[in-house]
């Protein structure tokens, strides 16, 4: 059974009108919501690293998607320059969309793969979610507070060397699907991004060393078949650990529960009676 089309898919003009309205609302929020948005960047690195991660640039997809993958690298390089070295002071909010801006051809962005309307397709600036995914992974290993985050409503590709738990990323779509976090601590933080031959790399740094760290884990991962459709579910938890007391866990927190449609047939799944609307 094929999923029913959304009203905006049947009438594209309504979709573009809705996007325009949401973007206007976001512009209004940026000016009147009383948040202090992070904007200062520096090449001088803060002294202590909280977390580092790397993300493979080119994945093993079909040959028809290879050019979109290559284009994605260009898109990532353009977007990363707007974030690399950003300082987040106490009381400031990081906004991905506000820093990166609208991806356009005039800025050098190319057609890359993006997930929209339940399918993977080409779009200008496609692929820059790889940066927001990486940043979110860094942030949830810190005391920073995530204030706005979205994740994809479906999973389009089987795992190919996946390192992070499913559903641990953060999708963005300029500008009404933003990724934001706020620094409610007394510390100053910094995000640095760079590229190696095969990876996008990033780190989160801080002005003074913390005496605790975070460990993020996945629980209750399953593939389900419901009413001839496949779904994927899991839970992502975080443990707060005291560094200097033999890794003693002092706090355990549920970060998020994920449940998303899968557009491929998984190797192992559980058939579950029921119906998904």
Image (tube, rainbow, N blue to C red):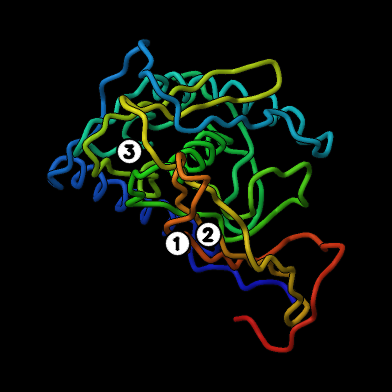
Q: Earlier in the sequence, mark 1 or mark 2?
A: 2
Q: Is residue 180 positioned above or below 75 on the image?
A: below
| Whether label 1 touches label 2, CB < 8 Å | yes
Other residues around mark 1 within 10 Å, as few (<14) / some (14–19) / many (≥20): few
| Whether label 2 touches label 3, CB < 8 Å | no
Q: Is residue 244 positioned above or below 154 on the image?
A: above
Q: Is residue 85 positioned above or below 152 on the image?
A: above
Image quarter in which the N terminus is found:
bottom right
Residue at numbered disc 3 = 95
Residue at numbered disc 2 = 237
Q: Earlier in the sequence, mark 2 or mark 3?
A: 3
Q: Identify the element where label 2 is drawn.
A: strand
Q: Nearer the viewer, mark 2 or mark 3?
A: 2
Count of numbered circles on the image:
3
Residue 64 x/y as whole percent: 80, 35
Horizontal side, residue 246 vs residue 121: left or right: left
Q: Earlier in the sequence, mark 3 or mark 1?
A: 3
Which label was assigned to residue 253? 1
Q: Identify the element where label 3 is drawn.
A: strand
Image-quadrant location for residue 47? top left
Q: Outermost residue toward the bottom? A: 273
Residue 146 x/y as whole percent: 36, 49
Other residues around mark 3 within 10 Å, as few (<14) / some (14–19) / many (≥20): many
């Amino acid at each position: 059974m094929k999923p029913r089309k959304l009203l905006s898919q049947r009438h594209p003009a309504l979709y573009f009108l809705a996007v325009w309205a949401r973007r206007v609302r976001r512009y209004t929020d940026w000016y009147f919501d009383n948040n202090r948005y992070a904007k200062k960047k520096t090449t001088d690195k803060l002294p202590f690293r909280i977390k580092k991660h790397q993300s493979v640039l080119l994945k093993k997809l079909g040959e028809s998607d290879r050019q979109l993958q290559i284009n994605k690298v260009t898109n990532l390089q353009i977007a990363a320059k707007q974030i690399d070295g950003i300082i987040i002071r106490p009381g400031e909010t990081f906004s991905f969309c506000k820093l990166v801006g609208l991806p356009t051809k005039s800025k050098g962005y190319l057609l890359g793969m993006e997930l929209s309307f339940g399918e993977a397709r080409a779009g200008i600036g496609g692929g820059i979610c790889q940066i927001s995914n990486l940043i979110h992974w860094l942030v949830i290993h810190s005391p920073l507070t995530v204030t706005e985050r979205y994740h994809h409503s479906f999973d389009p590709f089987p795992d190919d060397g996946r390192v992070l738990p499913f559903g641990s990323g953060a999708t963005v779509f300029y500008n009404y699907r933003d990724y934001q976090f706020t620094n409610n601590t007394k510390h100053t933080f910094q995000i640095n991004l760079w590229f190696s031959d095969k990876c996008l790399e990033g780190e989160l740094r801080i002005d003074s060393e913390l005496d605790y760290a975070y460990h993020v884990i996945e629980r209750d991962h399953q593939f389900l078949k419901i009413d001839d459709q496949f779904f994927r579910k899991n839970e992502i938890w975080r443990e707060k650990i005291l560094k200097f007391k033999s890794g003693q866990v002092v706090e355990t927190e549920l970060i998020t529960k994920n449940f998303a449609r899968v557009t491929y047939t998984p190797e192992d799944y559980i058939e579950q009676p029921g119906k998904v609307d």
